[in-house]
Image (cartoon, grey):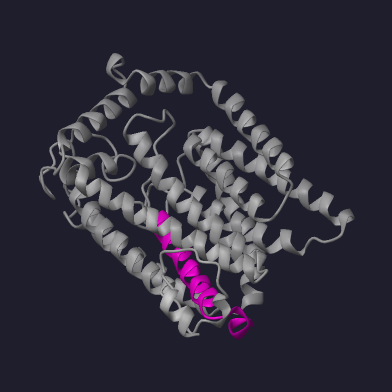
């Protein structure tokens, strides 16, 4: 035991019997990283949104207050999930997944026919994609590990295949191409954690991406948008102007930035600066040094999630492994995609930056995902057999 305490390091992956350890620093470290991202995110969201709130006729703190309220709501709901019995947590997808699909269908229909998107209280810009990803991860983690007989696998695979096609179709119809791509990537990670055959996973993911691309290219508006993102300084439409302004804002940040609140492009010169393009404002105000600090926090976030999944795998707990990998990758991959889109590297549609963008419902879902990740890190770090329901 003395050897374990002497050699144990929270930032290494040593092959030791961690079930015998009296505790683990991973939950505490993860909690500190999450709190740092959340608090830093609120500051950056306020800096990017106060001018937008004033121009909309709201108080300057409108979006900050909105995100704070959803943060509190997420913490309260997360506490309930933290103490929810394991069996009920595994059955939660039976309610969440159909509900998420119904909301996605509603949004797709209203958006396609130009009726207007679903309005959530205090949040007129309602995206259901994060909710669908959250429910899908829980569904895969609850269903796949329990499939043992070959005759039942076929039906389960067929059900997931059909629901995945429907989800990609609806997201593409809504114009959420970035979220559709994120959804497919999260599926790949969850399938791999479920120990499915890699050739089957590759074929399935390739088919979904091909299906999404065919649907997207069928839209003339998307072709114009793709050209605008590939050549932002040669186009004059709204998408090209926003992207060129975003790139200019990032370039003007330099190494140390202009300082929090001193950004120029957020003052009416960049659309969606408090949501999809918040990274541009952060780069302008914080500079390269601040951006690298944020990237480091997300890297540590990813590392601790992978570490938790590896511990769950040692305990043969597929549910915790799949959920941990799915939620960790969803948050980190979404952050990476948001930064790359705002930088003009990816030419997909805009996507929110977790913890930072002023999209309250997506912020709420992120808090729930982090709560479950903290719960699983706490369980796997202190001996699984003592925490099993």
- Residue 17 in picture, x, y percent from top left: 57, 75
- Residue numbers of the magenta segment: 361-389
Q: Residue at x 78, y 46 (%)?
A: 158
* Image side of residue 376 versus residue 98, left or right: left
- In front of the other: 209 or 6: 6
Query: Where is residue 32 drawn, in percent x and y?
Result: 33, 69
The quarter of the displayed image where residue 65 is located: bottom left
Compared across the picture, whether 149 is left or right of 191 comes to right
Image spot of residue 134 (x, y percent): 54, 57
* Along the line of sight, the residue nearer the viewer: 118 or 221: 221
Give the residue displayed 43% in from the left and 50% down from the top.
332
Q: Percent x, y for residue 152?
A: 85, 56
Is any atom of residue 190 visible in this view? yes
Left or right of residue 267: residue 352: right
Given residues 23 and 272, the one toward you in this image is: 23
| Outermost residue toward the top in this view | 234
Name above or below for residue 307 compared with residue 351: below
What residue sits 62% from the left and 76% below the top?
Answer: 86
Residue 351 in view: no
Q: Main secondary structure of the magenta part?
A: helix
In the image, residue 364 above or below residue 185: below
């Amino acid at each position: 035991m003395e050897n374990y305490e002497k050699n144990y390091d929270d930032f290494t992956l040593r092959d030791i019997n961690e079930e015998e350890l009296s505790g683990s620093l991973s939950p505490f470290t993860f909690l500190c990283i999450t709190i740092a991202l959340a608090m830093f995110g609120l500051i950056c969201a306020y800096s990017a949104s106060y001018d937008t709130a004033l121009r909309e006729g709201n108080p300057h703190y409108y979006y900050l207050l909105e995100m704070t309220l959803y943060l509190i709501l997420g913490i309260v709901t997360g506490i309930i999930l933290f103490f929810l019995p394991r069996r009920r947590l595994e059955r939660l997808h039976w309610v969440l997944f159909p509900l998420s699909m119904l909301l996605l269908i509603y949004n797709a229909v209203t958006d396609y026919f130009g009726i207007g998107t679903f309005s959530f209280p205090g949040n007129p810009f309602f995206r259901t994609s994060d909710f669908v990803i959250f429910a899908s991860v829980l569904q895969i983690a609850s269903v796949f590990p329990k499939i043992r007989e070959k005759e039942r696998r076929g039906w389960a695979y067929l059900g997931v295949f059909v629901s995945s096609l429907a989800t990609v179709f609806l997201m593409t119809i809504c114009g959420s191409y970035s979220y559709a791509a994120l959804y497919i990537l999260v599926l790949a990670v969850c399938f791999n954690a479920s120990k499915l055959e890699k050739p089957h996973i590759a074929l399935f993911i390739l088919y979904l991406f091909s299906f999404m691309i065919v649907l997207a290219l069928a839209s003339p508006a998307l072709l114009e948008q793709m050209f605008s993102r590939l050549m932002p300084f040669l186009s004059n439409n709204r998408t090209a102007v926003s992207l060129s302004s975003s790139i200019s804002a990032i370039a003007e940040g330099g190494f140390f930035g202009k300082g929090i609140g001193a950004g120029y492009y957020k003052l009416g010169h960049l659309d969606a600066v408090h949501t999809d393009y918040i990274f541009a404002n952060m780069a302008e105000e914080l500079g390269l040094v601040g951006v690298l600090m944020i990237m480091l926090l997300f890297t540590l976030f990813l590392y601790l999630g992978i570490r938790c999944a590896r511990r769950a795998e040692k305990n043969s707990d597929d549910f915790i492994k799949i959920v941990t990998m799915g939620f960790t990758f969803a948050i980190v991959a979404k952050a990476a995609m948001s930064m790359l889109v705002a930088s003009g590297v990816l030419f997909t549609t805009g996507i929110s930056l977790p913890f930072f963008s002023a999209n309250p419902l997506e912020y709420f879902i992120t808090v729930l995902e982090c709560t479950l990740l903290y719960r699983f890190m706490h369980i796997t770090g202190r001996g699984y057999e003592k925490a099993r329901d």
